[in-house]
Amino acid sequence: MIPPKSVGVKVKSPENGGRRLVITDIHGCANTFIKLVEKIGLNHNDQLFLLGDFINRGPRSKEVLDFVLFLIEEGYNIYPLMGNHEETVLHIIRERPEQLRLLLRSRNSMDLLNKNKKLRKRFFRFIRLLPYYYELDNFYLVHAGFNMNIEKPLTDTHAMAWIRNFSLNKKFDKKRVFFGHTPTKFSKIKEAIASNAKSICLDNGCSHAYLGKEYGRLLCYDLDTQELFKQKNID
């Protein structure tokens, strides 16, 4: 499903034994993404939450979005979020459209454009409807995090797409937060999961394998079983 345009969307738990799965920061690594989805054995009872930054850096941004749209069209329960890279594209289109080609060329994503050098319509429709967070029974899912220094953290969309190094407080009560945006060492991610940390970054820098052996994987996390699936970058 593509959700209605909203800052945040509440999502009920799946029925019929479906899993709640989370992937973030695919960054144009379509082959890796498809392989990971095959590895987890995604089915129509599952909910798959995609926490933004589908595009840029990796070589296959168009193929990533095409695959996400294919899953939606095939009736899978797909819940995509706005990332800072998608937000930047929207901002450029609205404020400085003449710079879109320059932006995408610098980020290895010219395949997002049609023959008229404009963002393909199906991608624009998809991106402009993306919400900034999902609220589940015990979790918040967001691309980057939340601004906990204001009275109402769920109103600051800039922070949801861009913030780094945030700390949760009592405003979120008992809910945990899963997010991406900041490439994090694989060992640190595993430690956070093992300790049931209140906030966990699932971005292992799929497009950042050059940082060393602790990076370069696309991860999928099962919110209920705590199982962590991983796929080394094959793009």
Image: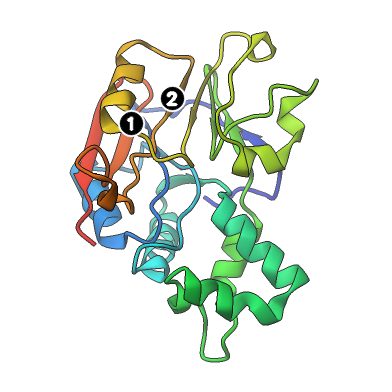
Quadrant of res 41: top left
* Along the viewing direction, whichever of 172 and 42 lies nearer the viewer: 172
* Along the viewing direction, whichever of 39 and 200 lies nearer the viewer: 200
Q: Secondary structure at mark 1?
A: strand
> In the image, what residue occupies the spot 29% across and 47% down?
211
Residue 157, which numbered label? none
Amino acid type, callout 2: Ile
> In the image, what residue occupies the spot 67% across and 38% down?
159
Graded by Cα atoms within 10 Å as few (under 14), some (14 to 19) or many (20 or more), the crowding at tag 2 reads many
Residue found at the far front of this picture: 211
Q: Is residue 18 visible?
A: no
Q: Is residue 206 above or below residue 175?
A: below
* Along the viewing direction, whichever of 44 and 164 lies nearer the viewer: 164
* Label 2–label 1 contact, CB within 8 A: yes
> In the image, what residue occupies the spot 21% across and 45% down?
231
Amino acid type, callout 1: Tyr
Q: CA distance from mark 2 to mark 1?
A: 11 Å
Q: Which residue is mark 1?
A: 221
Query: Looking at the picture, how far across and down is residue 182, in whole percent?
Result: 46, 39
Query: Looking at the picture, how far across and down is residue 115, in whole percent?
Result: 51, 91
* Along the viewing direction, whichever of 48 and 56 lies nearer the viewer: 56
Q: Secondary structure at mark 2?
A: strand
Viewed as shown, does residue 228 lie left or right of 87? left
Residue found at the far right of this picture: 151
Residue found at the far bottom of this picture: 116
Query: Looking at the picture, how far across and down is residue 67, in whole percent?
Result: 37, 62
> In the image, what residue occupies the spot 33% across and 31% down?
221
Q: Which residue is mark 2?
A: 200
